Image (cartoon, grey):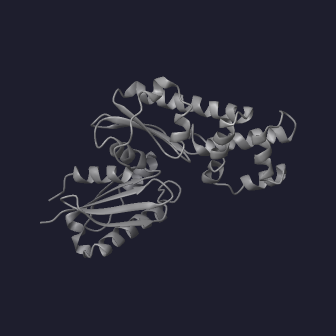
Amino acid sequence: MMKYRIGIDGGGTHCRGRLVDDKGYCLAEFVGGSANVYTQYQSALDEVEKVVAELFKLANLPCSEYVNSILVAGLAGANVPQVKARLESWKLPGLTHKIVSDVETACIGAHAGNPGAVFICGTGSQGAVWDGESFHLIGGWGFMLSDLASGAELGKNALRMALLAHEGIIPHSSATQQLMSEFKHSAEEMLLWTQRAQPRDWARYAKQIFEFAQHQDGHAQTLVKQCVADAELMIDALMDRCHNELTLLGGMAQPLKEWLPQRIVNRLSVAKGDALDGALYLARHYSFSE
């Protein structure tokens, strides 16, 4: 009897799914909306159900084949204990499933199931170490408390510095002038923006800061150096627990790498796969209940 595996990566702004047969042949792929089970628990799970249904539809498989299938989904927010407890009661009729955090599937994918570590630094940030049997996670507690070396954190620090310069507390630079111009050089305009801004909105300023830093802007370099110091703090904590490969992932990975000390760069490895590959790896190695 054919067995099917479904992998879902819900760690970004979209929920990506892939359905494969027991030989690993891809039968269907589908991309849905966001699936953060901490910020939007029910809608995230609704999105997972939608992706699974669409995958079976695209593969011309009836829902009755759920009983011969296993789903592993790596979802943002699934690391929070309260959320994990709620997820234990979630079911899709007939479908064997396992839900883990997106950083876990990313770690498994990056190292093709072998022991290793990842530090994901994108809009937010989180680290994971996989020793072959269990995970150790650091960070991932959201923009207000955590997310060191993330795009959102760098953007927040940049706007704070721009506001200091705007008020004459520190000198202006090209970077702070540019940032304030986006708010019509108005502190009130910036304040109103913060009331509706999401982490991804703060993060969009990170690229500018790296570009200004490359052009020797003093304020931008100060911001980048602080971001690098935060990254070192997180990466060192991961390296203390992991003597295998370590991979940087996320939109901040490449620009940060150019500023990291050589001792860390020497430890870094290229990802062998992504979070979707990691979810499918776990699905293949998860026992079916007969």
Q: Residue at x 36, y 72 (%)?
A: 54
For the residue pair 202 and 196, the one nearer the viewer reads as 202
Q: Quadrant of residue 50?
A: bottom left
| Depth order, front residue of 107/101 | 107
Q: Residue at x 78, y 41 (%)?
A: 174
Q: Residue at x 29, y 58 (%)?
A: 97
Question: Which one is in front, 185 or 257?
Answer: 257
The residue closer to the viewer here, 102 or 245, is: 245
Q: Is residue 193 above or below residue 225?
A: below
On screen, residue 21 above or below 262: below
Pinpoint residue 155: horizontal percent, then vertical percent. Answer: 66, 44
Query: Looking at the rendering, which quadrant does residue 268 occupy?
Result: top left
**Residue visible at 84% across and 51% down?**
186
Vertical placement of residue 21 versus 166, above or below = below
Furthest toward the right, the residue is 168
Q: Which quadrant: the C terminus?
A: bottom left
Q: Is residue 130 left or right of residue 234?
A: left
Measured as percent of width and height from the top left, residue 218 is found at: 73, 32
- The single residue placed furthest to the front in the displayed view is 215
Residue 194 spot, x, y in % from top left: 72, 52
Q: In the picture, which quadrant includes the N terminus?
A: bottom left
Q: How many marks can you see? A: 0
Q: Position of residue 254 (x, y in %)?
A: 51, 40
In the drawing, does residue 168 fall left or right of residue 11?
right
The answer to whether residue 284 shows anywhere in this view is yes
Q: Is residue 140 visible?
A: no
